Image (spheres, grey):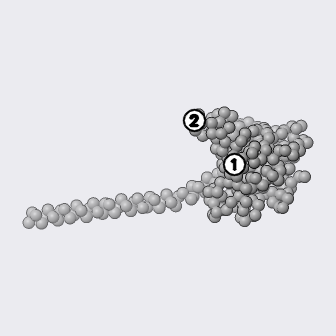
Amino acid sequence: MCQFAALGELGSIRNHYARKDVDVKTKLALTVLCIAVALPTFAQNKVDKRLSESTEVLKGSINKPDAIPQNIVDKAACVLVFPSVKKVGVGLGVSYGRGVLTCRKGAKMGGAWSAPAMYALDTGSLGVQLGGSSTDYVMLVMSQKGADKVLSGKLKLGSDASAVAGPSGARATGFNDPNADIVIYSRAQGGLFAGASLGTASMKGDDDANKELYGKSVDVQQIVRDGAVDVPPPAKPLITLLDKASPKRAS
């Protein structure tokens, strides 16, 4: 009798642990499912935040005293905005930023502004300049060569396109440098926009972020030049701002 009782208890123990194992597996599966569901939302929130921060940077960089000169903005074919670029890696001197690109529509790039493409910036030359602070960058693409390079989805300053510190004051009034494909302005936290250099910084299209924003795989060329997508709601404040500030390209 005791032997049968012992066997019964052993079976109960086995059933108990079997049920417990099932519970653990169920909880694990639910956890994985929750993470899978949450990841796209988290990524989308990051893209929306990037667009919002880029819009705020542009608000502070155009149509204001001591900001980027209006005539420079009006002559630009494209605008790249990289908010809060920070140094990453102690002692490495490497900086990395994520931003947005938009260009004027039309065959001659002279009209309204396109839907934005997500862009990424990295450079080994910013570490000393940035220190522990963050810096906003606005790059204005002035030439067709510069626009073609940036729309290719990959660009290295210096070798692919020439870049100069953006002019200000009297220098900006008659600025017409045929050798300057891109002009660059920067603003440290709490400061004003001024001409800046990015050395041989590299930039490329941020394909993952573009997919999150538009819900499908689209590259920079398709977004900006081909008009394959409409301006998504999170990007409308940025494009509206540019359309009001500089609706047509100056010759």
Q: Residue 230: x and y, percent?
A: 72, 64
Tell me which label, 2 or 1, sits earlier in the chain: 2
Q: Residue 181: x and y, percent?
A: 81, 47
Q: Residue 165: x and y, percent?
A: 79, 39
For label 2, the crowd category at 10 Å Cα-Cα, with few meaning under 14, some 14 to 19 and many 20 or more, is few
Q: Quarter of the image holding residue 190? A: top right
- Residue 149's place in the image compared with 132, above or below, is below
* Residue under the image location 44 percent in, 58 percent down: 31
User: For the residue marked with disc 2, what is the amino acid?
Assistant: Val
* Residue under the image location 78 percent in, 55 percent down: 148
Instruction: Answer whether labels 2 and 1 touch (C-beta < 8 Å).
Output: no
In this orientation, which residue lies closer to the viewer: 161 or 69? 161
* Residue under the image location 39 percent in, 60 percent down: 27
Left or right side of 127 for 145: right
For label 1, the crowd category at 10 Å Cα-Cα, with few meaning under 14, some 14 to 19 and many 20 or more, is many
Left or right side of 229 for 94: left
* Residue under the image location 76 percent in, 38 percent down: 196
- Residue 237's place in the image compared with 133, above or below, is below
Left or right side of 9 for 122: right
Q: Residue 216: x and y, percent?
A: 63, 64
Q: Is residue 56 visible?
A: no
Q: Secondary structure at mark 1?
A: strand
Q: Which mark is residue 34?
A: none
Viewport quadrant of the N terminus: bottom left
Residue lying at the far left of the rendered structure: 1
User: For the residue marked with disc 1, what is the amino acid?
Assistant: Met
Q: Quarter of the image holding residue 183? A: top right
Q: Nearer the viewer, mark 2 or mark 1?
A: 1
Per the image, the residue denoted by label 2 is 90
Q: Quarter of the image holding residue 125? A: top right
Per the image, the residue denoted by label 1 is 203
